Image (cartoon, rainbow, N blue to C red):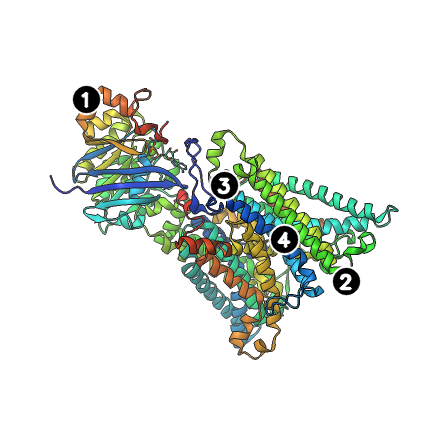
Amino acid sequence: MSEPILVVDRLSGRIAGQQVVEDVSFEVPASGVTALLGRNGVGKTSTIKSILGLIERTGEVRLAGTRVDRLPTHRIVQRGVGYVPEDREVFGALTVGENLRLAERDDRPRRELVDRLFPDLVERRAQRAGTLSGGQQQMVSLARALVNENRLLLVDEPTKGLAPRIVDEVAAALAEAARTVPILLVEQNLHVIRALAERVVVLSGGRVVFTGAASDLLDDEDRIQRYLGVHDAAEGQNASEGESR
Amino acid sequence: MSTLLLLVITGLGLGALYFLVASGLSLIYGLMGVLNFAHGSFLTISAFLGWEVGRRVSDGTWAGLALSALVGMLVGAVVAAATEYLLIRRLYERHIEQALVTVGLALASVALFEGIWGTDPIYTQKPEWLGETTEILGAKIPNDRFLLIACALLVLGGIVLFLQRTRYGLIIRAGVENRSMVTALGIDVRRSFTIVFAIGGAAAGLGGVLASVYYGYVSAHLGSVLLIFAFIVTVIGGLGSLTGAAIASVLVAVLQQFANYYLGGTGDLVVVIALAAVLLVRPRGLMGKAA
Amino acid sequence: MNQQRTDAAAPVDAPTRDTTTGPTPPPAASARRPLLLLAGGVALVVLLAILPLLAIDIPGVLPGPTYTPGTLQLLAYAMLIAALALSYRMMFGLAGLLSFGHALFFAAGAYGLGMTLYAFAPVAWPSELIFLGSIAVTLVVGIVLAATVGSLALRVTGISFAMVTLAFAQAGSVLIRRNPGGATGGDEGLSLDIEHVPDALVGVVNTRNLYWLALGVLVFVYLVVLWVERSRAGHVAEAVRENELRVRVIGLRPYTVKLLIFIVASVLAAVAGMGYLLLQSGASPRIATADFTLTLLVIVVLGGVGYRWGAIVGGIVYTLLDQRLTALAGSDFIAGLPAVLRVPLSEPLFILGTLFILVVLFLPGGIAGIPQRIRTGRKQHPVETEEAADA
Ligand SMILES: Nc1ncnc2c1ncn2[C@@H]1O[C@H](COP(=O)(O)OP(=O)(O)OP(=O)(O)O)[C@@H](O)[C@H]1O
Ligand SMILES: [Mg+2]
């Protein structure tokens, strides 16, 4: 197996002086989809934001072997990281076209690819992104990342709150993207994880409690219950430490 | 009827001044979260230097005034950009400290202006036509009001074009909405901070020269007086909204003129009450993004 | 400032006390420390109290020996400003309320007392009663004003709060300058009507008494501030500043606590304002301006937002510096300098403003933070951690 694209080593993150990511370590291999899982509020989004330097962090992050944890966010992204944030974060006052244009980093942006993956957006170039439906906004958000040639994609809950049909569309787009670029995917939908992920990393109480092949977790009802289930008395030790509810 | 018209047009003229100051304030706050107390000083230094250059070349002529305006805009842009680059940037993301630094700069610079140009107003010359009036529907409108309104419209148009048509404009608009997402797209948003300061400074600089036309003098406190009203305008209009700033400038200034005329010179008070009312009913201002 | 996510509940059981966020000095090394501090504080107050009886001369800092009226007047003024700064710090430093309208309440104290004394002048009561009655009336007015402004302004937060307070203060300032019914004296200012003021507090010969009065005001304000900070409300206010969401989760209403702090701080400012009126034998409209509040902000930050005594040090250093720099500006030495140096150096506010910028940039803990910086040898920034949230 080749060198991992992303190495996260003892990463901690804080928001408003409060520790939300605690000493997290894991790796993302250079191909395929790695899912980052865990219960609500466990710190998945915060982990992604720490990797990108969007929140205060300490620890080591290596992208393709180079340390990036001291770099400002835009530098990290310029090294080839595409980010699809939770809740889409499209610029509502800007048009779809402007959202995409803003995201173009490369000399030759892959506009045809984006148009092919999201035909819905083509005729809506001039529409304000704020007036799009949730699904369409998610496509804009994905398109903003896919329009560039990336070494890694960080995708945070791309199917959150979407209709089943749109979920499939998003999953298809991700599957296509995953053929050429490794993805770290935060996702709650087990079907989507089953379809896409080869490896999983599970967080609990702000820490990593499981890493391994996706099948090891997904074929084990007990583990699913323990790590991702809603109510379970036998919650792991780490989970009781504070952040998780 | 003629009084009404006079009040409205005079209000528009004053509103034009407010807008020249408030547009920069609003953009700067919207993009960077910095409440810029030094904005008045950008205006004052531009007014002084514009006047110094203009009067040496040809005092009281259109050419002199045009030169003053150019110098004023240039000075405003340069001083503002330097402020951002040398002071504000060092405190990246620490909004309170950034505001504090601008407070210090405002205090220090006004004192310096007093040291250089004295504490008394210095009366200025303007082209003859600007001192005359034009009769519209029976109302005798001072001509300088038209100049102010025209300039503010030009600035508004210019900024809108810049924001709509350029890549930096795009970055600024996006940044006002969600700055961290802009950086997450791989864009160094700091460069646009300097640009926003420069644009705001240039507008304030032009405002300084025009204020010296409107009031007929320059003084070390020219900017401080306008700054308070510009703050009010910015908040009423909605922090970060250029359109909001434009609308609120006109509303505030016209309201002020009417109150001054019909309510026994209570314009300032009425404006303050209007601010309190707007904030209580609609805390984010007329056009501001949701807080 | 920080936009809290209202949909996410923060843990309530593990309050992270964050030493880098400044305001609370590090916990005492031993139990003896508070006692030592108390003894030191009492000794300092005693020293200040007997100062008028001594002949200490510090050339360059004080205009003359400590028993002379000029020096006492200056020191008394500095102490009142320190008291005012202390009340401002309670809002800004403790509760995190950045008000631009604190001058309003100082002015309300000064003008309120002055105007009440005029209003009562024709009444045929004993002078003492009128004097004390006027003070009581002014306090009530102060409380009502503070409650009104506070309850309105606190409906918004952050910059909007700053703006509403600024607006109210501006309204007050405009009113004072406009001189309605000749009550405030307009631009000329209001002179003190001494008819019912105790003789001991009138005239240059009694500057000493005024000095003691100012010292009393400072000690009083300090004790009230200390009491509030130690009280439950103080702790909640501090918690609100750090993380409003967390406090909401515990089930307290930040609004009430903030309003309480706002009112107490404002009334304390009014008390300082009354002292100011007596000391200066009048009030000038300058004390109601936004610039005056900005000066307070400068003082508090200069002294060190994180420390109670920072406000006192800041107030005294600022006042003395201002006075000495003004004296320096008029000196022959300055007059002999070339214009490039002479012009800036003859403007005290230029020097103070520049100094302030340097403090914000390079000395984040202010003057009071210097010992701490030397001890830890680290470059800490008081509000560094707050900002990460809005990134
Ligand atoms: N802006 C904020 N202020 C305070 N606390 C926050 C903030 N954002 C997140 N948190 C806290 O940080 C912890 C982790 O949040 P995060 O969003 O990373 O979780 P998550 O695993 O992505 O949850 P979800 O599955 O619901 O998206 C939570 O306890 C949350 O309450
Ligand atoms: Mg999340």
Give the SS element for disc 2. helix
Q: Is residue B101 above or below residue A209?
A: below
Residue flagged by tag 1: what amino acid is it?
Asp
Q: Which dot marks residue A219?
A: 1
Left or right of residue A166: residue B40: right
Quadrant of the image where one finds ligand 1: top left
Q: Chain of mark 4?
A: C
Mark 3 and mark 2 in contact? Answer it, CB < 8 Å. no
Mark 1 and mark 2: Cα distance apart in space? 93 Å
- How far, Cα to Cα, is label 4 from label 2? 23 Å
**Same chain for the residues at labels 3 and 2, yes or no?**
yes
* SS at mark 3 in the image: helix
Residue holding disc 3: C241
Q: Alpha-carbon distance for marks 3 and 1? A: 47 Å
Chain of the residue under label 2: C
Q: In this rendering, do the residues under marks 3 and 4 share a single chain?
A: yes
The residue indicated by pointer 4 is: C45
